[in-house]
Amino acid sequence: MNQAMFRSTSQALHFAFMIQAYEVSVENIMSKAIRAIMKELGIWNEGDPSTVDFSGLSPLEIRGQCAMIRAIVRDRLPGPEAWEIQARYGVNETTTIDGKKRFVFSRERQEAIMSLGDWMAPSFPNFNPLAVDILIAKAVGALNKKQSNGITSREMAELFGLDQSTYRHALKRVSEKLIGLESRAIDTLTPEFERDGVVLCSSTLCA
């Protein structure tokens, strides 16, 4: 392959997980979905996208490549690193409860957050386990104020005890731990993605 599909491992992961939010459909609709994802990621503005190359691949083949990327994350990374990628890049789904649109985690994202919570719980022995899960969800961007399931530090203090500053400090610690996991995951995945032509190779060894 002369041109890699993506310019970076992070971009490949983001696209591969985001595409799950779109149902498999006829190719012309799938093409529009792919274009919408690239616009959301800022890799398609006017004209043709300059940082991705899907030449020679049909929309369903692109979706297959994305499934392969997700499988590599699941099967090749150590547990914590895989969970971090699944939690950070996974998608939220929407559902209607009592006539109102609600955001809910996909099963994969929920399980990844809970697994990270179990792994990280010993670092926060005085915390309610659910509070640790919520901090992880906030740190990976799965919860925010715009969503109906967002939660503030003050609300966490009211629900679980301790004080607001404790949760703010804990969120910073959680974020730092997760950034470290993501960095290790990307370092592990990048050589394989470069070798397979998934991402642009930055090494002269790929020439």
Image (spheres, rainbow, N blue to C red):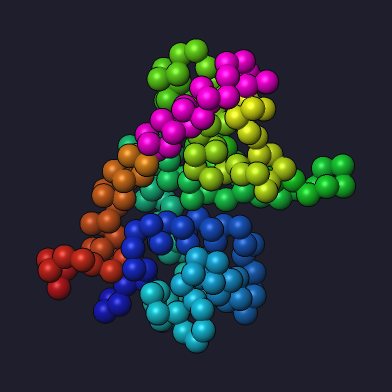
Image position of 131 with respect to 46: above or below: above
Please name the predominant secondary structure of the magenta segment in the image: helix
User: Percent x, y for residue 147?
Assistant: 68, 46
- For the C terminus, the quadrant is bottom left
Res 77 → quadrant:
top left
Residue at x-position 48% and y-position 50%: 89
Name the one closer to the observer, 167 or 148. 167
User: Percent x, y for residue 87?
Assistant: 49, 42
Residue at x-position 49% and y-position 43%: 140
Residue at x-position 63% and y-position 33%: 152
Image position of 195 with respect to 140: above or below: below
Q: Is residue 194 highlighted in magenta?
A: no
User: Percent x, y for residue 108?
Assistant: 54, 42
112 displayed left or right of 163: left
User: Percent x, y for residue 99?
Assistant: 87, 47
Residue at x-position 58% and y-position 24%: 164
Q: Which residues are magenta?
A: 157-178
Q: Residue furthest right?
A: 99
